[in-house]
Image (cartoon, rainbow, N blue to C red):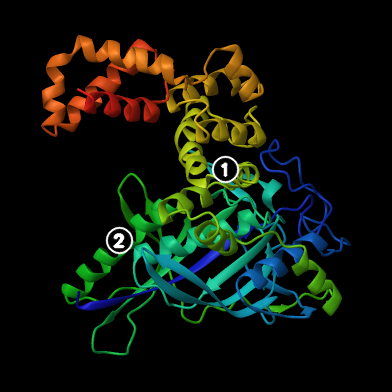
Amino acid sequence: MRYQVIIGLEIHIETKTKTKMFSSSSSLFDAPANTNVGVVDMAFPGTMPTVNKQAVKNAIMLAHALNMKIDDELHFDRKNYFYSDLPKGYQITQQRRPIGKDGYLDIFVGDTKKRVRIERVHMEEDTAKQIHLADITLIDYNRAGNPLVELVTRPDLRNAEEAMAFIEAVREIVTFLDISDGKMEEGSLRCDVNISLLPRGTTIFGNKVEIKNLNSISNVGKVIETEIKRQIAVYDSGETVISQTRRYDDVLKDTVAMRMKDKSVDYKYIPEGNILPISLSKEFIDETIAEMKELPSAKRDRYFNTFKLNAHEVNILLQDKDLTNYFDRAAQDVKNYKTLINWIIGEFSSYLNKEGKNAQNVALSPQNTAKLINLIDNDTISNSQARELFMHIVETNDDPETKAKALNLVQVSDTDFILSVINEVINENLHVIDDIKAGKDRAMGFLVGQVMKKTKGKVNPALASKLMKQEIDKK
């Protein structure tokens, strides 16, 4: 490619609190429209904002997870602009002194590690939600004033794959720290992408284009690829890319211009006069950091080094916090982590997907899943018996061992019984013996399969195979 792609991200994260950033109104998602709104949210005369302590703690945790310098004094500013989704006519934010600055996050794209620098993390309040209909726009002020943190990267990303990996890494962090649910489809995590092209051999960046409010990681990938092609086509035609704000049209599968960017944009930031600077003690910051849950990076290291999982297995776990927690609890009571992970991402996940459930609301406890895995691991039941047993206990949480005995789902390891079945099978298939002695392994598999068929799968297949070989060697 004759151009180097320059990408920076702005990620807005709605953090978990019971109330809004600067008021006592509920921040509950999906409440009836305009029911979680108070006089402070609507900036009634004489009302005063108060700072949400948990929102501050959430921001400190995120800043620490992103290796940032944490400011020990809170300063807020007013970002002045007029828009229908902004009831005050200004937004309370942090312009001059963000709570976190100069951090980084290491991401992996395939097997390649990349460090992405992070310029700042700052706190602010969310805007109202607009619902665009055919000829009118409705406004739901429930979201107005909800606590946000905004994360701004340096322009260190070079392609869609890196951008998607970075967003996924941030989503993992906020969900595992439990400071946000990270649901892009619900607006809890939203992303703006800034893209420009740098002709190779030059140092002058092309004009920057911003694509606003992307609500899925896959859409981020589509948008970046689409916008790169568009900008290349513009430059190749001899024209100049216009600095503007665009949005992604899912029907057109293309970015569409919203408004031009003015390089001299001035929001007239002024200090928020109703919130005086607030000192954060070292004890408060240290205690907040000490409360943090295990980071995804630490989980990843543990899964690789302690449990010996592979990258595919680890990535599947870390995409689902509930599944990860379920695995961790079950792993406390098993020795064979490989059997456990195969079961969790196989039969267990298949059941959850089919039934529309998650690992948090399934009836079967992690402890009983561990017992099921141990029954497989010590050859008490076969894999096929385990699948049958699972369907009997997944909605009742019955004890696996007790249920297996009640259903007669226990493998037969009686050598005399197995030998009698083996000799019966050999006598019925004497023509296969020569094939086996000629080295045809499939023939041996056929005979063992016949043993399993006659015993309805209740014989230990490894033991049956061993005894079958011994009997054939005698022939």
- Amino acid bearing label 1: Leu
Classify residue 164 by image quadrant: bottom left
x, y (%) of residue 211? 42, 62
In front here: 442 or 122? 442
Q: At numbered mark 2, what does the secondary structure look like: helix, strand or loop? A: helix
Q: Is residue 408 above or below residue 262?
A: above
Identify which amino acid the numbered label 2 is placed on: Glu
Left/right of residue 219 with respect to residue 80 in the rendered view: left
Residue at point 40%, 73% (across, down): 157
Disc 1: CA contacts within 10 A as few (<14), some (14-19) or many (>=20): some
Disc with the residue nearer the chain's start (1 vs 2): 2
From the image, tell me which residue sits under label 1.
Answer: 323
Q: Is residue 91 visible?
A: no
Instruction: Give the x, y percent position of residue 368.
Output: 64, 31
- Determine the residue positioned at 77% across, 62% down: 291
| Quadrant of the frame with the N terminus | bottom left
Viewer-closest of 343 and 292: 343
- Which residue is pictured at 82% across the width and 65% down the height? 51
Left or right placement of residue 269 versus residue 36 in this view:
left
Answer above or below: position of 300 versus 99: above
Q: Which residue is mark 2?
A: 225
Q: Percent x, y for residue 264? A: 50, 82
Give the spatial CA distance, label 1 vs label 2. Answer: 32 Å
Q: Quadrant of the C terminus?
A: top left
Compared across the picture, whether 220 is left or right of 123 comes to left
